[in-house]
Image (cartoon, rainbow, N blue to C red):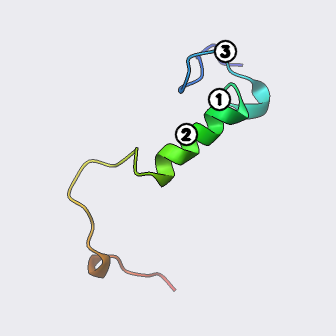
Amino acid sequence: MSHRPCPICKKPRNAQFTPFCSSRCRDRDLAQWFGDGYSVPGPPAQPEDIVREE
């Protein structure tokens, strides 16, 4: 098991919620993704530039 701490609160990781320490930190991370808290650097993509793969 890794000795790195939870990326959200820095407490020790829990194997059940890896890489987080709890479901709370896991859910906080998911909320960051849903709320655009994380992003990839660069200009925003325009909807017409995104090609659907079917």
Residue ID at (48%, 49%): 33
Of the numbered discs 2 and 3, the one sitting upstream in the chain is 3
Spatial separation of the CA atoms under disc 2 and disc 1: 9 Å
Residue matched to label 2: 29
Numbered disc 2: secondary structure: helix
Label 3: which secondary element: loop
Q: Position of residue 7 (x, y in %)?
A: 53, 26
Residue located 33% across and 49% down the image: 40
Residue 22 point in image, percent of width and height: 71, 29
Q: How many marks?
A: 3
Quarter placement of the N terminus: top right
Residue furthest out toward the bottom: 54
Res 5 → quadrant: top right
User: What residue is at 26 percent from the left and 73 percent from the top?
Assistant: 46
Quadrant in the picture for residue 12:
top right
The residue that disc 1 covers is 20
